[in-house]
Image (cartoon, rainbow, N blue to C red):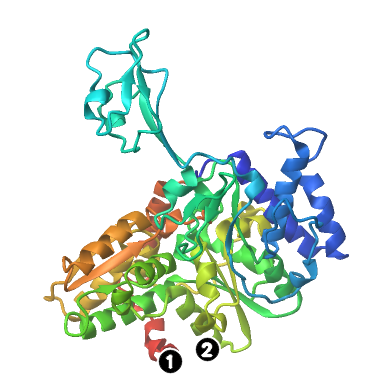
Amino acid sequence: MRGVETRIQEIRHAVFTEVAKMAYEEGPVDKKIEALPYKIIPGETGNFRNDVFLERAIVGERLRMAMGLPYRGAAEPAPVSDGIMEADKPEGYYTPPLINVIKFACNACEEKKVHVTDGCQGCLAHPCMEVCPKKAISLDRVTGKSIIDQDACIKCGRCATVCSYNAIIVQERPCAKACGMKAITSDENGKATIDYDKCVSCGMCLVNCPFGAISDKSQIYQVIKAIQSGEKVYAAVAPAFVGQFGPKVTPEKLRAAMKELGFADVLEVAIGADLCAKQEAEDFLKEVPEELPFMATSCCPAWSVMAKKLFPEYANCVSMALTPMTLTARLIKNHTPDAKVVFIGPCAAKKLEAMRRTVRSEVDFVLTFEEMSGIFAAKDLDLEAMHEDVDGVNDVSADGRNFAVSGGVAQAVVDVIKKEYPDKEIKVANAEGLEECRKLMMMASKGKYNGYLLEGMACPGGCVAGAGTMQPIKKSQGAVKIYATKANHKVATETEYVKELDKLVD
């Protein structure tokens, strides 16, 4: 639903904006947050759920998670501000679980159901009956229409495939359908529940739930407090940022707006992407096929965690290269040891990555573009009217900027290798979406991709399709590719920062 401004997006934006305003204002936080559900959902009647109290309760939990606080179910009697002092700190890591189902907002959708709609014409052929392996479809002798015995139906969908009128549909719970890890099932009340042993925090359930019942935690409040405390807070902006804050908001205007908020400086994470491409190219040349049958890219945390969870015997085949986020943060802290780094990007799984002990010292905060938009709104900044700040760091490659789109990571690694070994053939296979990524790894585990470089992207379309993005995916892909052509270099190894790789990697 990226690019479609639904009621869910409106509420999310309002929550992020109000949390940011609360951080900027003086006064007791507990009293302010108690009043916010009434500000966001005003009046005597509900807007969509016909229960204003339920809507406010849902907003209350969204506010808590936007503050980084744990979700509480409807059975727990406690004010919205419960434990608020834990959030009122200038520094704090995300605590699991990162993504939560707000149970009392969940519609308890059926997991999967095949049913005949009113579009059935009662045709003479009835191919639906012929293809059903369980004979679960019968004929209504009065209307001539098909009837499905739900107890006998195995939900294979063959009947829907052969219906000439598309009158048979397969309905799946949207969040579960979007989950490539099969981590979402139903609890005893039919509500969606997440198996955190399977979940990789890609956030696809979050953006596909039409009831807005799934939400992740945020560090909006903590980032603002860190800036206010006088810390040197640097913004590391992911390559997918192009166009996310409006079609007229140039990278130079975005940089000016970030500095207006108090950030010490703004760097493109394409710098780290260049470093990552160089490191992965070196590893591939050294290890494949002599030491490893294949090598999988490491920059997408949801993909790499999925590969290691489901195929532990091939965990060593996932590149050990540091991700662009971590490399950019290390570069910043190498130049400014007392800096704090905020990664601002499209990805919910980057929050999970930042929770790792090996990354905590590098990346202090992670925000999505959507959360960042709430901060801009809180300060009432008109990004389109900003004067362009052209003094930022832009010594990056086109390949580094193209990390944001599917296929871009592998292409960057191949280009680095081709630069040094122009005659060397590099075989590449890539997948986008965790379902396809799972299939890719399955084929690799069976020896189908020996000698290959594998690129996996958890989000269909690449990073531009991450859970924290706001514009249509195709539009983002186009914007990123155009911006990439404006880079100073084509290949990662041509940039100035690649010379510093040895200082950043142990």
Task: Check whether the beta carbons of the residues at disc 2 and disc 1 lie within 8 A of each other.
Answer: yes
- Side of 62 relative to 337 (left or right): right
Circle 1 — which element? helix
Task: Compare residues 435 and 261 and report the one nearer the observer.
Answer: 435
Which mark, residue 503?
1
Local crowd at mark 2 within 10 Å, few (<14), some, or many (≥20)? Answer: some
Q: What residue do we see at 51% from left, 63% from top? A: 196
Q: Residue furthest left?
A: 423
The residue at the point 76 percent across, 78 percent down is 229
Mark closer to the chain start, 2 or 1: 2
Query: Which amino acid does the dot numbered 2 rest on?
Result: Asn
Decide which of 232, 4 is in the foreground and name it: 4
Provide the residue designation for mark 2. Answer: 334
Which residue is at the front of the view, 445 or 431?
A: 445
Question: Would you say 301 lies left or right of 406 here?
Answer: right
Q: Residue 139 is drawn in which quadrant?
A: top left
